[in-house]
Every structure is written in structure tokens, then in C-alpha cells.
Amino acid sequence: MISFQRVFKRYPNGREALAEVSFDLAAGEMAFLTGHSGAGKSTVLKLIALLERPTRGQVVVNGRNTAAVKPRAIPGFRREVGVVFQDHRLLADRPVYENVALPLIIAGVSRRETEKRVRAALDQVGLLGKETSFPLELSAGEQQRVGIARAVVSKPPVLIADEPTGNLDPDLAVEVMNLFRRLNDVGVTVLVATHDVHLIDRFRVRRLHIEQGTLVGVPDAAA
Amino acid sequence: MPRPDKGSPASRSRERRSPVAALSYWLERHAQNFVASLGKLVRQPFASALTIGVIGLGLALPAVLHLVVVNASAIAAGIEDTVQLSVYLTQPLTAEQARKVQQGIDARDDVLEAELVTPEQGLREFEQMSGFGEALRALGDNPLPYAITVRPAPRFDTPEAVATLADELKTLPEVDIVQVDTEWVQRLHAILEALGQVVWLAAILLGVGVLIIIGNTIRLDINGRREEIEVIKLVGGSNAFVRRPFLYTGVWYGLGGGALAWIIVTAAVAFLAGPVERVATLYGSGIRLQGLDTEAAGVLLAGGTVLGWLGAWAAAQYHLRRIEPRA
């Protein structure tokens, strides 16, 4: 579902973020992407969401080689990838319902179907009944769960998360991670970047560890 | 045109809709944007009023110039009716001879009326008009010749026909000088024509000004909503989707500015109508100040709307491309 083949990434400012990274994440698989900050975790996620393109090598997501995705087709590509951010990036001036509905409105889903799916997504993250609240009225954990609901509302086959528990206390972090597990159980391919050692120990999922732009200690990596 | 389902093959098959559903979605999105963008302007009344005010003034100026030309042309048309030729006869001439010439001219098809002015009448008029009566009387003899005032027939009052008439009258043996009072009318026409060009020039320059104002306002709006734009792009919003609300904002600015310009011009005409009418009455003229007709009002509103859309489009096209989401 996600495949990196000998990916090298250098930013325009000359910084080399990824040396040569190769890995495969099968459909329905879940993995942690671990490593120190600055090791290259964010770059891996950016390449998957097509926020960046590799300098060399291939990134294949959902059967599509990102190199072949033209700028015009990027929006359509991104609708296939749910993204959860550490700072959740909700729109503060819109209620929860509109935040979660945004991907469906963009995709042109009918109003009735949108209502149904938004409620289903909010139910999934345990926030049913908070539709009319504004993000700032919610707790940090709740805001993060709204962000997750938005990422999964259009049922993308791939879900990536960048430090989704970074701002949460341990209990909330476990709760959020359980949520990712449940999504994975229903077939979503999940890749979570984190450096939260507690969570890594607690959840027995595959681990991709990245150090100075290189994957280390990953059995099926070519590097 | 939105391209909501121009995604990957997977998304296209998942979101496939009938053309009717797609059209209804499209209409719904546009109606929603139409209303929402108006709501945004209403929620920041001061800033919106400033922008619309500047646009309104920018559009009002060429409209006012247009009315100046329209009204001046109407006045000129009124004056044209009174085109006349002064035919001075040779001296000496008896009253009988002069009357014969006058009758000959009066009988022409291209002449409405020919009136004989005797030297005595001419002297009286001259005294009244110029105040040089004393000087003339000092000459003893009346130096003025017989004169005939000729008014061309209605279909022969064009500058060309009048010139032809003058040339023909000049060939009469009893005629000394023919004076045509059309030269200044031609000059007036030339001035009005030039003024008409000025209207166009002003309209173009101020139209560009309006474009720049709207473009700049939309640019600020885009910068202020950077965060929102990034999020929308992150979750798969196309440029067209992001652009749409800004285009409607531009349309509202333009339409509001056009409406304001109409109000300004109409108010100015109402304000000036009274004084102009008094002046016209004093000059014994029935001329009334003309306001904007339906067509001009339509041009003002449509022009404003188009300029608003264009300005917003240019700004959005340029600035939205530069906002790409960072993770």
C-alpha cells in the first residue's frame, strides 16, 4: 500500500533528509515510524501525502507512483490519504461538524450522505453530540480526535499521523492510539510517526526506525 | 467549473454520480459560496464599505463624464436647429431690388425662411447689441447694406448642405458676402467627440484602477486565510475549490461598487436638475438634465461585476498557487 524504493530526499536548502530509504507497508498493515526529531520521520510522511517529492527513488502510495501524479491531480491523490497532525490543524472559526465534513464537501458528496458519514466518523472517535461545538471549546484530546475524524471521514485506504499524541497526556495518548488500532482492524493502512516510548512498548506493531535519514533494524528493508 | 471528483480512478468510481446529481451539487456549492461570501463582507462592514466606496467612486467618475457628453450633445442638437446664414447684399441697391433677391432666396427648396433686414433695422440692432451706435451715427450716412437672414430647411441643416447653400448664394450678382454661423457648431461637435474619447479613456484607466483595488483586497483576504487554505489543500481541495469563495467576494465588491456608482450619479443628477432647469428657463430653452438610462445603469452594474470577478480571479490565480501546505 505504501512502498518506498531507494528514496533519497534533499531539500532546496541543501539539507539531506533521507539518505536511501526503502520499505513496504502492505494493505491493512499498521506500523510505527520512530526516530529522533530531525531523523527524517516528517519527510517520509510528507512524501506519502505528496507535500514533497523525492529527489531520487520511488514512492508508491495506493498503487500510484507519486512521480507520475501531475500537479492538477494532487488534490485527488490527497483525498486517498488521511492525514492527522500533531497540532491537528482544525479551522477554529468553524464548528466540529464543518471541520469533519470538509473532505466530503470537497469531494462533492451529497448533503445527506455527508451528514451520515460525519456522524459515523464522530461516533467512531467518541465525539457524537459535539457537532456544533467549536474546536477551542474542546479539550486537547477531543481536538485531536476531531482531527482524526476528519482524516477518516472519507474512508481513505491510507492513514498517516505525525506525532498525533505529542500534545496529549499518557491516558489520552493510549486512547488515541487505540483508535488507530481499531481503524487498522477495519482494513485501513496506518503509519504513525511517534517518539513516545511508552506507546511503542505498549502496542505490538511493526516498527520502522529511522536514524539520520536511514532505516535501521527493519528486517524487510532493503537498506 | 468545479471538478469535485477529478481524483484518482478509485475515488472516481467511488464518487460517481449522475449528471443531474453533479449539476445539483454544483449549483448548491455555488449558491452556498454566493451567500457565504456576502455574509463574510457583512461581518466586516467597515472594511467592506471602504472597498466598495473606492470602487463606487472609481466607476462613478466615467459615468458622470458620460452624462456630461450626453447632455452637451443634447444642447448642441438644440442649437443646431438655429443654424442661419447672413447674406449681405452689394451697395448701392434699392429696396425693390433687395426684396426681389429676398423672394428669390425664400423660394428655394433648401431654404425654410429668408428675412430681409433693411439698413435701418440693421443699424438699430447693431446699436442695441454692440453699444457702438454713437460711433456709427458720427459717420452721418448709414454704412450698412441690405442683408438677408436665411434659415435652411430642416433636411438641409447639415454642415455640408449649409456650405453648398452658401456657395450657391455667393454666385448671385447682388450678393456681396455670405456668412455661415456653423463653424463654431462644428467645433462644438469636435469637442464633444473628443470628450467622448475622454470618457472611454477615463473608463479604461479607472477600470484598471478598480481591478487593482479588488485584486489587492482579495490578496489581503487570501493572506489572512492562509491557514484555512492550507488545510483545505491538505485534505484534497483543488485550486478551483479554494478559489471559488474569493471569486464571489470579488463579484460582490464589483456589484456593490457598481450599485454605489449608480446611486452617486443619480443623486448628483437630482441635485443639479433644479439649477440646470432654472438656467435653461432663463435662456428660454426646454433642455432638461438627463440622468442614467436603463442601459447605462446596466452597463455600470455589469461592468462592476465583471471587473470584480476579473480582479479576484487574477489575484487568486497568482497568490493561491504560492500557498502550498506544510506538514
Image (tube, rainbow, N blue to C red):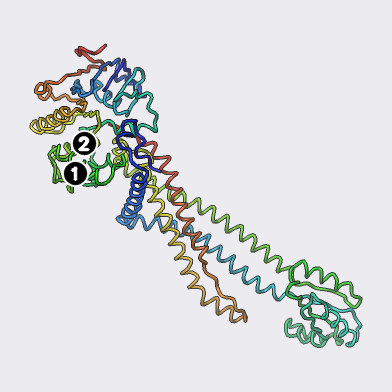
Relative placement, left or right, of B213 versus A212 is: right
User: Which numbered disc flags the more N-terminal residue, 1 or 2?
Assistant: 2
Picture quadrant of residue A189: top left
Query: Which of the pair A204/B147 is nearer the observer?
Result: A204
> Is residue A82 depicted above or below B315 in this figure?
above
Q: In the rendered structure, the residue with mark 2 lies on which chain?
A: A
Q: Please state the horizontal and vertical placement of residue B202, each as a whole percent of the image.
A: 55, 56
Residue at 43%, 58% (x, y): give it: B257
Circle 2 packing at 10 Å, graded few (<14), some (14-19), many (20+), is: many
Q: Please state the horizontal and vertical placement of residue A201, each as a whole percent of the image.
A: 10, 21
Q: In the rendered structure, the residue with mark 1 lies on which chain?
A: A
> Is residue B70 depicted above or below A154 in this figure?
below
Q: Please state the horizontal and vertical placement of residue B46, each as a whole percent of the image.
A: 33, 57
Residue at 56%, 63% (x, y): give it: B66
> Is residue B50 depicted above or below B13 in this figure?
below
Disc sitting over residue A135 in the figure: 1
Please name the residue that numbered disc 2 is placed on.
A88
Q: Amino acid at mark 2?
A: His
Q: Amino acid at mark 1?
A: Pro
Q: Secondary structure at mark 1?
A: helix
Q: Can residue B84 be seen here?
A: yes
